[in-house]
Amino acid sequence: MREVAFIKQNKEKWLDFEQAIFGKAKKNPDEMASLYIHLVNDLSYAQTYYPKSKTVVYLNYLAAQIYQKIYKTKRTETNWFVYFFSIEVPLIVYQYRRYVLYAFLLFFMTTTIGVVSAKYDPDFARLIMGDEYINMTLENIKDGNPVAVYKSGSNWGMTIGITLNNLYVGLISFIFGIFAGIGTFYVLIRNCIMLGAIQYFFYEQGVFWESVQGIWIHGSMEIFAIVIEAAAGFILGASLLFPKTYSRMASFKIGFKNSFKIVLGTMPFTIAAGILEGFVTRYSLEMPNWLNVLIILSTLSLISFYFLIFPFIVNKKIQSAK
């Protein structure tokens, strides 16, 4: 796109920014944050496509001014950490909500494939999980504790090891999106097929409920976060495949920045899941059923609300303030 056309296309939006910064009418900080996201996207495009133009200088100045205005205002109400997770991440998730939908559709489809494959192929679970894991699990079932694997280490040792591994898996799933989303697709379907296969294996052995207690106390947040991280990977891949009016490099910069913020948004849940796995899951079969169900539903409700409902609430609040 020629610079003149770019300016003409975005002129009204930039004038809104000037009014938000220098006008007498005060705008809601949340509304300004929404405008700021659009401005930074335009700035990234201009820096790539017109690096030495006055447009870059102008947009950079606006970005600096509105950034100071937003965060100066927010610091009087809350800290940056709260603002990032309560406003910025939900707005980005709302902006890319269809990728979250795609990731969940793929999750349900491939988990079902894992279940069906394990049902009709007696050796499928061994193929996916490995003989060592299956044999160990069969021994644990005979001993009366199908999920004894979660007692195999110390509380802190398991918590740290599992949390680091889950953070690593999430980052790999995201980064692999750079390969046109194919890498993310592979990581997600591999994990989902494993999940479906092992859950059917437990069902086949007659210990399905015990496995639910052992897996989903921490798995509600852990697996949900993996799906969201996959959505971030798809956003990254789409930024390269479908740059729209941006250059491919500008589109990639925008896609990477926004999708990485979504990944950061999953990390508190991943860490919380690791703590639950290290300290609570090991006692799942000794706890009353109502407590297991309460923990599972509470954690699932919390992360579902944050990524599936809260973005719409934040967006609606900002739109109504305009």
Image (spheres, helix red, strand yellow):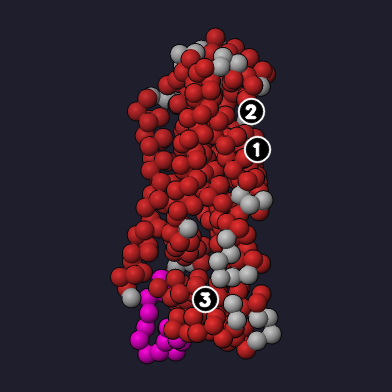
Q: Are marks 1 and 2 in contact (CB under 8 Å)?
A: yes
Q: Residues within 10 Å of mark 3 (few under 14, many from 20)?
A: many
- Magenta range is 14-30
The residue pinned by badge 2 equals 153
Q: Tell me what residue is drawn at x 65 percent, y 81 percent.
A: 50
Give the alpha-carbon distance from disc 2 to disc 3, as whole Å. 49 Å
Give the amino acid at mark 1.
Answer: Gly
Q: Tell me what residue is drawn at x 42 percent, y 41 percent.
A: 299
Q: Where is residue 238 drawn, in percent x and y?
A: 57, 56
Q: Tell me what residue is drawn at x 56 percent, y 21 percent.
A: 148
* Quarter placement of the C terminus: bottom left
Q: Residues within 10 Å of mark 1 (few under 14, many from 20)?
A: few
Q: Is residue 259 magenta?
A: no
**Side (left or right) of 191 relative to 17:** right
Residue 161's disc is 1
Q: Are marks 2 and 3 in contact (CB under 8 Å)?
A: no
Residue 39's disc is 3
Q: Is residue 146 visible?
A: no
Where, by quadrant of the figure, is residue 78 drawn? bottom left
- In this view, which residue lies farthest toward the top? 142
Q: Earlier in the sequence, mark 1 or mark 3?
A: 3
Dominant SS type (magenta) = helix
Q: Is residue 256 above or below residue 186?
A: below
Q: Mark 2 falls on what kind of element?
A: loop
Q: Where is residue 265 drawn, in percent x and y?
A: 52, 54
Q: Is residue 15 magenta?
A: yes
Give the amino acid at mark 3.
Answer: Leu
Q: Where is residue 319 drawn, in percent x and y?
A: 34, 70
Q: Tell me what residue is drawn at x 44 percent, y 71 percent.
A: 34
Q: Earlier in the sequence, mark 1 or mark 2?
A: 2
Disc 1 versus disc 2: nearer the observer? 1
Disc 1 versus disc 3: nearer the observer? 3
